[in-house]
Image: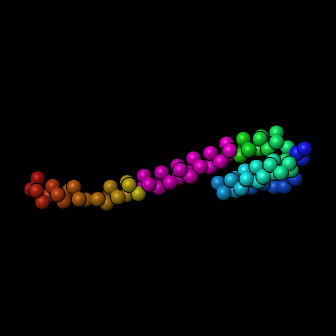
């Protein structure tokens, strides 16, 4: 039972590639084409990588949101105009 996966270059440069690899591992373990122990090890390492990729994506999105908020705050002159209209 369970042969080793046919070795070929695996690219896990982004979340989509990593998820596809995980799906492939799952399928190959299920069909008996991959040894469950090796599949488990590959899945563990891939999941660590996947979480790292997801965190990087979230950090980039958060950075963009913070930059947009800072830009909006810098361009927002509404509080100054209200003060001027009240005569302060």
Is residue 55 positioned above or below 68 on the image?
Answer: above
Residue 52, position in %: x, y?
Answer: 62, 45
The residue sitting at 77% across, 44% down in the picture is: 42
The reply to whether residue 61 is visible in this rendering is yes
Q: How many marks?
A: 0
Q: Can see residue 13?
A: no
Q: Which span is picked out in magenta?
A: 47-67
Closer to the camera, 51 or 87? 51
Task: Estimate the x, y position of residue 20 in percent, counting from the top left.
Answer: 71, 56
What residue sits 38% from the left and 55% below the top?
A: 69
User: Is residue 10 depicted above or below 35 in this figure?
Assistant: below
Magenta stretch, main secondary structure class: helix
Q: Relative to residue 43, is residue 67 drawn left or right? A: left
**Residue 49 horizontal/vertical position (percent):** 67, 46
Magenta stretch encompasses residue 85: no
- For the N terminus, the quadrant is top right
Q: Is residue 53 left or right of residue 69?
A: right
> Which image quarter: residue 75?
bottom left
* Residue depicted at 25% across the width and 59% down the height: 77
The picture places residue 32, in percent across and down from the top left corner, at 86, 48
Q: Is residue 81 above or below residue 32?
A: below
């Amino acid at each position: 039972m369970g042969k080793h996966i046919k070795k070929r270059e695996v690219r896990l440069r982004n979340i989509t590639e990593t998820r596809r690899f995980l799906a492939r591992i799952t399928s190959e373990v299920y069909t008996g084409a991959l040894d469950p122990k090796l599949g488990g090890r590959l899945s563990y390492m891939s999941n660590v990588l996947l979480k790292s990729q997801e965190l990087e994506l979230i950090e980039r999105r958060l950075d963009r949101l913070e930059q947009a908020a800072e830009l909006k705050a810098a361009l927002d002159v509404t509080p100054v105009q209200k003060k001027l209209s009240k005569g302060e």
